[in-house]
Image (cartoon, grey):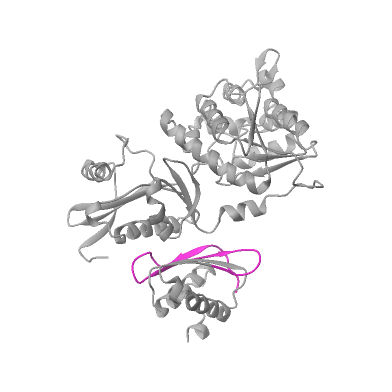
Amino acid sequence: MEIKHTAIAGTLESSDIQIMLSKVEGATEIELESAVEKQFGAQIRTLMQTILDQYGITNVKIKAVDKGALDCTIKARLITVIQRATDKENDPDWEVLG
Amino acid sequence: MDYSQQTRQLNLKETHYYQQWVTLLTQEGIEGLPQTVNDVEACFGIFEGQQLIATGAYQKNVLKYIAVDHHYQDGKLFNAIISTLISALAQKGIFHIFVFTKPKYRQSFEFVGFNLLAETDVAILLETGDVSLQQFIAQVPRPRVQKQTQAAISAIVMNANPFTLGHRYLVEQAAKASDFVYVFVVSQDVSLFTTAERFKLVQQGVADLTNVVVVPTSDYMVSYATFPAYFLPESQDVIGYQTALDAQLFKKIAAQLNIQYRFLGEEPFSKTTALYNQALATNLPPEVTVKVIPRRQAADQVISATRVRQAVQAGMIETVQNFVPDTTYQFIKQNQASLQARIQKGMQVDGN
């Protein structure tokens, strides 16, 4: 799927994550700012990459500011921002969600 | 966030809100607040009961007037107010955001994803979002010279509103003295001639100079983010620290593009530009050498873009025909009506 424009989802409040998705030339970039980078940085990146792969999204930059979000929150925020960035808010990809 | 706390948009035209806002900002050490707030597009506040405990505002893509009551400062309110501002800007399609603040707040902003662009003793500039300084620098064309490290590379930054023979003279001088010249055209779209028009006229005006490349500044030089006082009336102090930051940021860009010289046109008219030139001369060396070129005269008159705009306003463009290259002259002639309409709608002619 193709990113049509930059989009954002989530907040900077405790237990949440704010994710911005934008189009770039070249390989996928994940820029993560997290208080738990040392403990969970790798796990968060892997989770994000898995979801991007499910949607078939490449050439994308993720800028994420994590405030201690659980995996389910990260997944929900990332799916939301993908739908916004691909103009699919009203037409979700049910196969990925399932 | 606490359920007793509520985030609301603040209308600073209402005395009740304005007073609470001033009280909070003053208490947190932000001085020189305006009597009527004209430099803010939207302002938000977090209330506990009736009391304002955190606030933040934006204008275009710049965050400003951010303060949190120090009795509550555990970071939560700060994150909440920044989050509110980022979401509000995202709804307007603005994702590349700057903030101009005191050095002591650096870490607070870095914790919410901002990156430092420039710093002086009194102020710092940070950015966040879908574009970054590194991406900007990466897309600037590199010179096709044999040995980049030995080549003399120069830069000029101009608004060119519009491009005159004075600008042309400055570029020619730089082109003669250097192997390669970057002409950065200011991207902020607040001048009589639009950004696209100014850019095109510069490109046409220097088309014959083979060692010159014209590049947009994006938000990184002389913009609302780096140097708002260029476009808005401001006190000398404010101009002083903004120009110092703009100069620091330029140095950072210059280092990566191998720029050793910055050419400036001597400034006899605009006080702001004169102060800017002075700040560059103080801040850029030793890494970047500043070269000031005296203004060129046409028939004993100093060429200036301000005079050209005044002539457009007066409908007497023939009087400045010898101030501008033919490309600029033809453009003005063909678009005189629409330029005059912009002036009538309130576009300033005398500023920058």
User: Would residue A29 appear left or right of B107 to someone viewing this image?
Assistant: right
User: Would residue B112 appear left or right of B294 to someone viewing this image?
Assistant: left
Determine whether B309 is above or below B100 in the image.
above
Q: Report the front residue among A20 and B140.
A: B140
Task: Where is residue B176? Give x, y as percent.
Answer: 78, 31
Task: Where is residue B184? Give x, y as percent.
Answer: 64, 40
Residue extent of the magenta highlight? A1-30
Q: Is residue A90 visible?
A: no
Task: Where is residue A42? Give x, y as percent.
Answer: 50, 76
Q: Quadrant of residue A60?
A: bottom right
Q: Residue furthest top?
A: B300
Is residue B34 rendered magenta in the image? no
Q: Residue furthest left?
A: B49
Q: Residue furthest right?
A: B146
Is residue A3 rendered magenta in the image? yes
Q: Residue at 23%, 43% (x, y): give it.
A: B23
